[in-house]
């Protein structure tokens, strides 16, 4: 019993010394990855209008939405809430958290919504005025490849399209034009 206590104390001491060494090498809390600055374009309140296309996910129609996006957790993350509506469909709400993973050298995003869906996607960043997130979406017991493409059309306007891969082919699900307030 005494050996476990001495070993445990030694481990706690080593862990404390490790944190102290890291703390002395770095002044203050860790800073966000510089790559997070690339995503500042999205911060603010956006209003969007668009359309959905008929697919196994639902019927075609028009839609409106609002996105509120902000820096979060000391700038290490970007957090957004999207609320939307479409005739003949229940109200829609989704949330995301995005950050930059230095090990992967990619921006990563986790999405959840009020339909029980969730996705994890990644992008290497903007290529000119276009940014594409690709990943896997999980909904109703199924997993599908997904792709969201954002295209800047000015400092306060963009186009957003979203697609799913079904039977090995990309299927457009919708597109919208968004304006920052």
Image: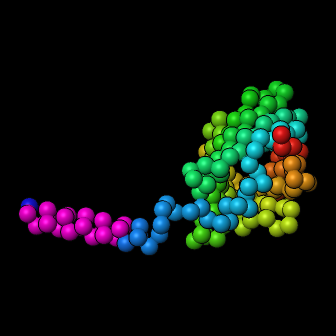
Front position in the image: 97 or 34: 34
Question: How far across and how far down the image is residue 112, in percent?
Answer: 63, 43
Front position in the image: 158 or 17: 17
Tell me which residue sits at (88%, 48%) in the image: 157
Question: How far across and how far down the image is residue 64, in percent?
Answer: 84, 34
Q: Is residue 5 magenta?
A: yes
Res. 47 image quadrant: top right
Question: How far across and how far down the image is residue 168, in percent?
Answer: 77, 60
On screen, residue 106 versus residue 88, left or right, reads left
Q: Quadrant location of the C terminus?
A: top right
Question: How far across and how far down the image is residue 95, in percent?
Answer: 66, 42
Q: Is residue 119 magenta?
A: no
On screen, residue 152 versus residue 125, left or right, reads right
Tell me which residue sits at (37%, 72%) in the image: 21
Front position in the image: 13 or 130: 13
Tell me which residue sits at (73%, 35%) in the image: 83
Q: Is residue 143 visible?
A: no
94 versus 10 height, above or below? above
Residue lying furthest left: 2
Magenta span of residues: 2-20
Q: Is residue 69 visible?
A: yes
160 versus 25 height, above or below? above
Tell me which residue sits at (80%, 41%) in the image: 46
């Amino acid at each position: 019993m005494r050996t476990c206590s001495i070993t445990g104390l030694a481990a706690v001491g080593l862990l404390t010394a490790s944190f102290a060494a890291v703390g002395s090498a770095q002044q203050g809390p860790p800073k966000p990855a510089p790559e997070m600055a690339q995503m500042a374009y999205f911060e603010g309140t956006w209003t969007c209008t668009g359309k959905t296309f008929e697919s196994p996910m639902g019927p075609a129609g028009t839609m409106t939405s609002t996105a509120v996006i902000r820096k979060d957790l000391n700038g290490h993350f970007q957090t957004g809430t999207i609320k939307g509506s479409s005739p003949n469909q229940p109200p829609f709400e989704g949330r995301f958290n995005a950050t930059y993973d230095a090990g992967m050298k990619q921006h990563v995003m986790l999405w959840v919504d009020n339909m029980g869906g969730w996705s994890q996607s990644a992008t290497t960043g903007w290529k000119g005025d276009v940014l594409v997130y690709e990943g896997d979406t999980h909904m109703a017991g199924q997993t599908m490849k997904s792709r969201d493409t954002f295209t800047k059309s000015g400092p306060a306007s963009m186009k957003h399209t979203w697609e799913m891969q079904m039977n090995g082919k990309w299927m457009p699900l919708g597109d919208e034009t968004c304006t920052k307030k």
